Amino acid sequence: MLSKMFDTHERAINVRVAGLNHFIWVTDVFVHARDVTEEAFRRICDGEAREIALSDAAGDTDPFLNTWGLRTELCGLYGYLPAAGDRHVCEFLPGYLRDEKERERLDLRVTSVDLRRERLAANTERPRRMIRGEEPIPTERSREEISEIIAAMWTGEDSVNIVNLPNAGQVRDLPLGAVVETYGVLNAIGAHASSSESSRSR
């Protein structure tokens, strides 16, 4: 979304993040190494990201689509941007989930257990079709980072990823030793907090 807002490639976007496991927040945004945090958050709070998301959805009812209703609201309330999509963020905020009017207002798309079971069955069958030669194996790079992590641990070359580690100053407003989720460096000797990615109070 940020790359669309700033009309640039995803590789030109860098962010700082901080939070707890699976509930992390973007604290700083950079485009081509230029700090655009205030501009980005202002435009998100003004509804630009939500408008783009709704336009892209174009009536698609897929419950896994993120239409930025909740993220926009939380960015306005707290001054930081939730890093995950609405469907995941709302799991940490049951007040939104329990209120049907709020779900409708923010277009919160809840995924049921039955739907998850259906997706699991489909996702299990797909690789089997690939093995049988009934479907081509994708050649484009996955967004998953596990291959980079394995390579870093094997070769010793640093890989920067979002990791859960004891707080050693990455999140200044949380107790030292608490497990926090921020950027970290992984290599042959393990995972280490990246002090240059520490969060700041706004």
Image (cartoon, helix red, strand yellow):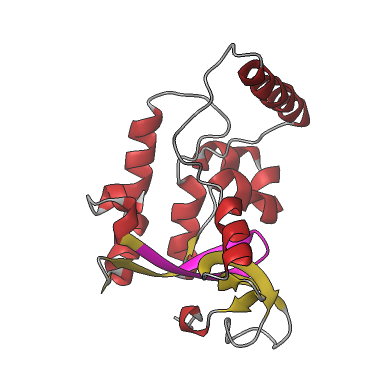
Vertical placement of 12 versus 28: above or below? above
Measured as percent of width and height from the top left, residue 134 is found at 59, 11
Determine whether 78 is above or below 105 in the image: below
Image vertical order of residue 71 relative to residue 141, above or below: below
Q: Nearer the viewer, residue 150 or 201?
A: 150
Residue 202 locus on image (x, y percent): 44, 80
Q: Is residue 55 magenta?
A: no
Tell me which residue sits at (52%, 84%) in the image. Answer: 195
Q: Is 4 on the left-hand or right-hand side of 104? A: left
For the stretch drawn in magenta, what is the main secondary structure? Answer: strand
Image quadrant in which you'd find residue 167: bottom right
**Magenta region: which residues?**
14-26
Q: Quadrant of residue 38?
A: bottom left
The residue sitting at 51% across, 24% down in the picture is 61
Whether residue 47 is visible to the viewer of this picture, yes or no, is: no
Q: Is residue 25 visible?
A: yes
Question: Viewer-proximal residue, 114 or 74?
Answer: 114
The residue nearer to you, when weighing 12 against 43, is 12
Q: In terms of depth relative to the viewer, which is nearer, 57 or 193?
A: 193
Indicate left or right for 11 with 74 as reference.
Answer: left
Whole-percent x and y of residue 194?
53, 79
| Residue 25 is covered by the magenta coloring | yes
